[in-house]
Image (tube, rainbow, N blue to C red):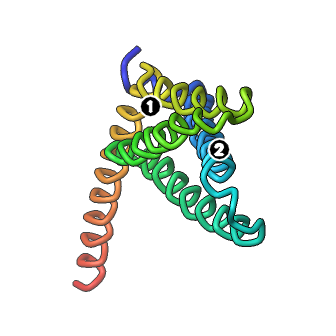
Amino acid sequence: MRPSEYLLSPPHYFPTFIGGMLLSLFSLVTAELLVLDAYFTDVPVEVSAIWLFAVLTGVTVLICICHFSMVYGRPQWVWVVVAVFLGCLLAVLPTIEHRPHKILYISGVLFPLLGLLNLNSNRHRELRKVVVLVRYKRKRFQAIRSARMRRLKAERCK
């Protein structure tokens, strides 16, 4: 299929986009829970809940901004999401020493790896290429429209 044909049928990219976003959020939450359970057991629950909420909110906003910037046609924002996945994976791996719950640990390792696999898939790469084409077409259309509006305004002033 040519890129122009992809523009006519974009819904097949939606599961890939939402999958990447959900996997990033799931990996963030499991990493946060494992790190809090392993390293911050002496901290009172009220303080750890406040920090948990603050970190989750901040990184979630960052993840959403990155994903929507990718959809807007800026594929370089994928590297921030890759850094979040790698950070979650590197935060989860050393917690094995504290004997965490097996399912939580496995999901903490599995979600970032699946997210990185999703970002590296052919469908996600095609998505990033197509949205760049859409961005270029949008800019071209806006330039043509603004030139036409300037010409019409100049004709009215005569």
**CA–CA distance in space, label 1 to label 2:** 33 Å
Residue at (26, 85) in percent of width and height:
157
Observer-nearest residue: 117 or 15? 117
Residue at (53, 33) in percent of width and height:
112
Residue at (30, 66) in percent of width and height:
146
Element class at badge 1 = helix
| Disc number placed over residue 127 in the picture, else none | 1
Q: Is residue 65 above or below residue 126?
A: below
For the residues carrying marks 1 and 2, which lies nearer the camera in this image? 2
Q: Is residue 14 above or below residue 80?
A: above
Residue at (43, 39) in percent of width and height:
86
Q: Position of residue 130 (x, y in %)?
A: 39, 33
Question: Residue flagged by tag 1: what amino acid is it?
Answer: Leu
Observer-nearest residue: 53 or 127? 53
Q: Position of residue 58 (x, y in %)?
A: 56, 64
Q: Which quadrant does the C terminus fall into?
A: bottom left
Question: Residue flagged by tag 2: what amino acid is it?
Answer: Leu
Element class at badge 2 = helix
Label 1 or label 2, whichever comes before in sequence order: 2
Observer-nearest residue: 147 or 14? 14
How many neighbours does mark 2 have within 10 angstroms: few (below 14), some (14-19), or many (20 or more)? many
| Disc number placed over residue 38 in the picture, else none | none
How many neighbours does mark 1 have within 10 angstroms: few (below 14), some (14-19), or many (20 or more)? many
Residue found farthest to the top: 1
Q: Position of residue 110 (x, y in %)?
A: 59, 26
Residue 76 image-quadrant placement: top left
**What residue sits right under mark 2 in the picture?**
34
Circles 1 and 2 in contact, beta carbons < 8 Å: no
